[in-house]
Amino acid sequence: MKKIIKSALDVIAYAFFFFAPWTIAGTQGALVIGIALATLMLMLYPSTAIKTARLLLFIVLYYVAYFIANMFSGNFYSSMSSLLNEWLPLTVIFWGVLDWDEKKIKRGIDIFVSVAAIFSVCAIVQHFWGWNFLRGKPLEPIEHFYIALGPYNEHLTFGGAYFLISFFILGYLLSKAEKNVLRKKLYWAFFVISSMAVVFSYSRSIWIAMVFSAIVAASFAGRRAVMWTVGIIAAAFGSFLAFFPSVLWRVSTLFNPSFGSNVNRIVLWKTALNMIKHSPIVGLGSGAFVRRFDEFFAGGYCPIRGHPHSDILNILVEAGIIGLIAYTGIFVVFFRASYRAVKDGSGVWKGYAMGAIVATAGIILAGLFECNFVNDEIEEILFFILSVGVVASWKVESQSRKIGEV
């Protein structure tokens, strides 16, 4: 029975790698089954190791913080209904129970990269063609080009999800863990293509994340590598600015306080701060930003009101300082474990840990200006990457224990 469950978990993992770059329905279907199988494994075989246990602890505390917030929200059932939609952090159970080995994860990442490469090419074509042939609708024009959506329905979602995949691979490549020459060449080609697709998503917060993550990746190699990276980034963006005036215009909007979405963000941030002042410790409960928006509205131009366009503000609104502490704990555990794997490990696990650090560092920075933590398409990939970093540390520690026993 144990072998059957393990084999089923492997199949589900491969299904995730196939579906995650393009369909939320397929991905979430696979993850639900994965969690169910992992839970069954733990029930039948309680001694099964959960390699992501440290991460899971803070995720549980994160949910506890939200439960407390919901109790004081004044609308407990509505708040709990909103919280039930936020189940993706629990996928670390699936990734923690999965029986990882180098051969399986390499095969899975190859599938991941291959599928993402296809849709990256589609996004680049969209940018020039102006038609989303994947969904059968026109794209939003920007100067002489168009905002690419890839396989998704929203450019911010596409930019965030594909940034994670692309820079996870970048970190892995820079770790020099991959010895297969053909795979390295194909991965580098994927990184270039996917990075272009992300640029053509015109997601400004992700552009900032790209620069930051590239510098984080270079920092593993020393100060000189950082200087070279800054120069390469400047040259790359200079080329984009020269050939794509739409990129230049979009960059200029970062510093334009009267630009529509900037005005909207400022109003959303002010509204969020009004909510935080009202209940700073425990927050207003899940879904409170939308549910109580009119009550705390700061006034002004604000056509989009779904969230405060900031992960930090969103958590403070919903779960207060208690929730923010738990949220921070998730990433502290991740970065400590992943850095340990990079420092003490070698080979594939060191490479994946480094890739996880590079990608996660950028998405956290982008989260200051966008709500990525509760975006399903991004969150699915993010919690896989967080799990990889923690599992890599677990693998390195296990190898060290075996050597010590010998």
Image (cartoon, rainbow, N blue to C red):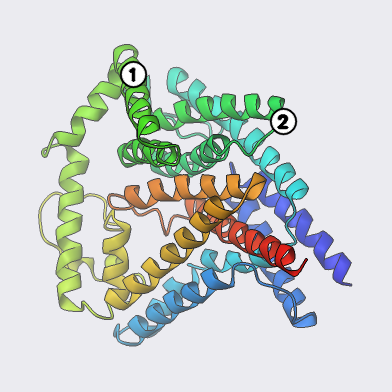
Marks 1/2: CA–CA distance? 29 Å
Q: Residues within 10 Å of mark 1 (few under 14, many from 20)?
A: few
Name the secondary structure under disc 1. helix
Q: Residues within 10 Å of mark 2 (few under 14, many from 20)?
A: few
Residue 144 in picture, x, y percent from top left: 33, 16
Label for residue 235? 1
Dividing the picture into quarters, in which one does residue 155 lie? top left
Judging depth in this view, the residue of 141 and 197 nearest the camera is: 197
Residue at (30, 12) in percent of width and height: 242
Residue at (62, 69) in percent of width and height: 93
Q: Which residue of the protein is positioned furthest toward the top in this rendering? A: 243
Judging depth in this view, the residue of 63 and 184 nearest the camera is: 184
Residue at (41, 58) in percent of width and height: 373
| Above-or-below relation of 236 to 253 | above
Q: Quadrant of the N terminus?
A: bottom right
75 sits to left or right of 120 = left
Residue 323 in picture, x, y percent from top left: 34, 74
214 sits to left or right of 376 = left
Name the secondary structure under disc 2. loop
Amino acid type at circle 1 is Ala
